[in-house]
Image (tube, rainbow, N blue to C red):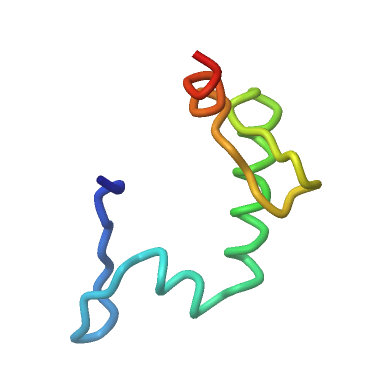
């Protein structure tokens, strides 16, 4: 089950907020995404084993080890 989807009204359309942000300003979206991932890494919530190509939740990796 994924996170709830947030919607935004643009004119007469109701669209997925994340999709609209990615489409309307991809540079800002990428910067925000990278900052979010950096904060998760510094809080030791995620880790990348391949220099940032893929990220894993540390709690999921710990569950695999148990």
Q: Is residue 9 above or below residue 6?
A: below
Q: Position of residue 65 (x, y in %)?
A: 55, 18
Label tally = 0
Corner quadrant of residue 33: bottom right
Residue placed farthest to the bottom in the image?
A: 12
Q: Is residue 45 above or below residue 19?
A: above
- Asked whether, in this view, residue 20 is left or right of residue 38, the answer is left
Q: Considering the image in quadrants, where does the N terminus appear?
A: top left
Q: Is residue 27 above or below residue 31?
A: below
Q: Position of residue 35 (x, y in %)?
A: 66, 46
- Asked whether, in this view, residue 63 is left or right of residue 2, the answer is right
Relative to the observer, which residue lies in front, 32 or 44? 44
Question: Which residue is rendered at x = 59% and y = 73% of the image?
Answer: 26
Relative to the observer, which residue lies in front, 64 or 2? 64
Relative to the observer, which residue lies in front, 44 or 19? 44
Question: Which residue is rendered at x = 71% and y = 40% of the image?
Answer: 48
């Amino acid at each position: 089950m994924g996170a709830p989807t947030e919607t935004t009204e643009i004119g007469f359309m109701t669209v997925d907020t994340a999709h609209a942000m990615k489409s309307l300003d991809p540079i800002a979206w990428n910067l925000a995404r990278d900052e979010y991932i950096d904060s998760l890494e510094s809080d030791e919530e995620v880790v990348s084993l391949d220099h940032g190509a893929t990220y894993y939740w540390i709690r999921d990796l710990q569950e695999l080890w148990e």
